[in-house]
Amino acid sequence: MANQAAKIKRIAISTGGGDAPGLNAVIRAATLAAINRDWEVYGIRDGYNGLMMPENFVEGGVVRLTRDRVRGITHLGGTILGTTNRGNPLRFPVRKADGTYEEVDRSDELVRYFHMRELDALISIGGDGSLEIAHALAQKGLWVVGVPKTIDNDLDQTVITFGFDTAVSFSTECLDRLHSTAASHRRVIVVEVMGRYAGWIALESGISGNANAILIPEIPYDLNKIAEHILERERRGRDYSIIMVAEGARPQGGAVTVQDKEVGRAERLGGVGEKIAAGLAELTGKETRVVVLGHLLRGGTPTSFDRLTALRFGAAAVRALDQGKRGVMVALAPPTVKYVPFEEVAGRMKTVPIDCDIMLTARDLGICFGD
């Protein structure tokens, strides 16, 4: 182990995919932990674009991270390094002469640029897509440790990901506010939240915020059953309803609602809330409104839980390098952290188990899931 760690003089940090509250806390913890080991630390701009297209950045695509540079960033949302979901080096979009795009594998080129910079190891902070890239780079010989990041909480092998608690807290606060306006106007309000193909944000904030129905990807819904639930509430004197919808929710026998699919990036979900609202208005005759929280869930100050988790992950990633570990992801396993091989994480998704205690609690409370 000591011989492995002795090779390290310079490490790099990258943040990829969607931003999440807590990213800056990881950067700060990893930077300080590395500097305290007399390592130099560098940040790669916008995922890996700083290495592959350094000419696009005013001060260069790779920047030195010092104590001064990471001072006072723990509480800040976003990432000081920038991020992107369009720079996958395994499927990099390249414009052809006819104006169309094709996906090209530039991973070998990326590894070469990494070594040209005399960087010894990489801490890759990201979600499922970023960790798949990290796994591929590790298989090509790059020394990589991953840190799980996503507000969706859909990464396997870790109890929770930083950013999730902040998203759930904000979504819950929004539901608290929407109850009063829905009650005042006797309306149905449909609230659409992020989460992609997992329903964790919708489920946990929906229960916490007293939603009357929660629609998640794991349980295809029947719109008629939701309408009947709304009308039954009305018969009991409750003349308004809040419907929480995950962006990846889909009707029975139907597909998810996709806004667009660009070359070099994952399909962009969204719009299911509008469809559900229109359907419920027709079935119930009630005035219906839609609120899409969208990117509001990604921004803002991280909660204390997300700050602490992110700081723990950043420090643990450096400890992993110091111990000679490679090709692993840091994971939360209370009361400590563990290191999970990339092959046990990459390509796997943690969805909501329909028989878990949270689901059982929701059903005991009388919340409708459209099934």
Image: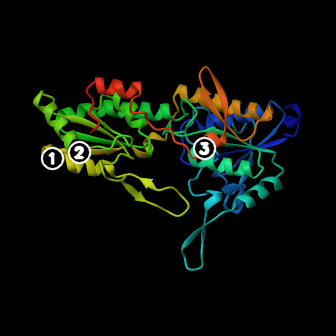
Residue 300 x, y percent position in the rendering: 49, 37
Residue on which disc 2 sits: 223
Q: Nearer the viewer, residue 298 or 283?
A: 283
Mark 3 is surrounded, within 10 Å at the Cα level, by few (under 14), some (14 to 19) or many (20 or more) other residues, namely many
Quadrant assignment for the C terminus: top left
Pointer 3 and pointer 1: residues touching (CB < 8 Å)? no
> Which numbered dot is residue 283?
1
Query: Visible in this render: residue 130?
Result: yes
Residue at disc 2, secondary structure: helix
**Above or below — where is 209 with respect to 274?**
above
Residue on which disc 3 sits: 126
Specify the amino acid type for callout 2. Leu
Q: Quadrant of residue 80?
A: top right
Q: Say which label, 3 or 2, has the lower sequence index.
A: 3
CA–CA distance between discs 2 and 1? 9 Å
Q: Residue furthest bottom?
A: 98
Pointer 2 and pointer 1: residues touching (CB < 8 Å)? yes
Q: Nearer the viewer, residue 351 or 193?
A: 351
Pointer 3 and pointer 2: residues touching (CB < 8 Å)? no
Q: Say which label, 3 or 1, has the lower sequence index.
A: 3
